[in-house]
């Protein structure tokens, strides 16, 4: 029982706790579709497409691979154009979630202070 209060055990538990915190999937970016940027039905489609690409890129990539495997498009360049468009969307800046960033910084600060 006397081992429960040792610094070695405390540091081991701290590392385990911090490891578990880092494994939590955090969405540090918020995706908002701004109505003031929409002027046409095409703008709505584009905004929704952009949000989907940013929010779930793995699912979008899976869909593209499935379409290509099924040879859905008659012209091969359509796949390249879609991939290029998706890469451009993923490169553009999106709104940061300040609260999530603040929490991450505070957790990291506590961890570094105690190690």
Image (spheres, helix red, strand yellow):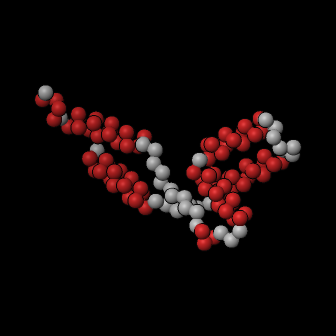
Q: Residue at x 83, y 44 (%)?
A: 73
Indicate the position of residue 41 as horizontal and vertical percent values.
71, 64
Q: Which of 89/74 is in front? A: 74
Indicate the position of residue 2 as horizontal and vertical percent values.
12, 29
Q: Is residue 14 above or below residue 112?
A: above
Q: Which of 40/32 is in front? A: 40
Q: Is residue 17 above or below residue 45?
A: above
Whether residue 91 is visible, yes or no, is no
Q: Which of 67/1 is in front? A: 67
Whether residue 79 is visible, yes or no, is yes
As drawn, the residue found furthest toward the top would be: 1
Q: Is residue 88 left or right of residue 101?
A: right
Q: Is residue 70 left or right of residue 59?
A: right
Q: Is residue 22 left or right of residue 40?
A: left
As drawn, the residue found furthest toward the left would be: 2
Quadrant (top left/top right/bottom left/bottom right) for the C terminus: top left
Q: Residue at x 65, y 69 (%)?
A: 38
Q: Is residue 31 left or right of residue 89?
A: left
Number of numbered discs overlaid on the protein picture: 0
Indicate the position of residue 78 as horizontal and vertical percent values.
81, 49
Q: Residue at x 75, y 40 (%)?
A: 67
Q: Residue at x 87, y 43 (%)?
A: 74
Q: Is residue 115 above or below residue 29?
A: above
**Quadrant of residue 40 in the image?**
bottom right
**Quadrant of residue 64 in the image?**
top right
Q: Is residue 61 above or below residue 86?
A: above
As drawn, the residue found furthest toward the front would be: 41
């Amino acid at each position: 029982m006397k081992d429960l209060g040792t610094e070695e055990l405390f540091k081991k538990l701290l590392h385990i706790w911090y490891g578990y915190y880092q494994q939590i999937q955090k969405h540090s970016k918020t995706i908002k579709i701004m109505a003031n940027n929409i002027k046409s039905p095409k703008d709505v489609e584009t905004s929704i497409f952009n949000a989907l690409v940013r929010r779930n890129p793995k699912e979008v990539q899976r869909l593209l691979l499935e379409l290509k495997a099924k040879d859905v498009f008659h012209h091969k360049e359509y796949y390249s154009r879609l991939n290029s468009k998706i890469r451009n969307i993923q490169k553009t800046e999106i709104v940061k979630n300040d609260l999530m960033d603040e929490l991450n910084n505070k957790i990291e600060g506590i961890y570094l202070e105690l190690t």
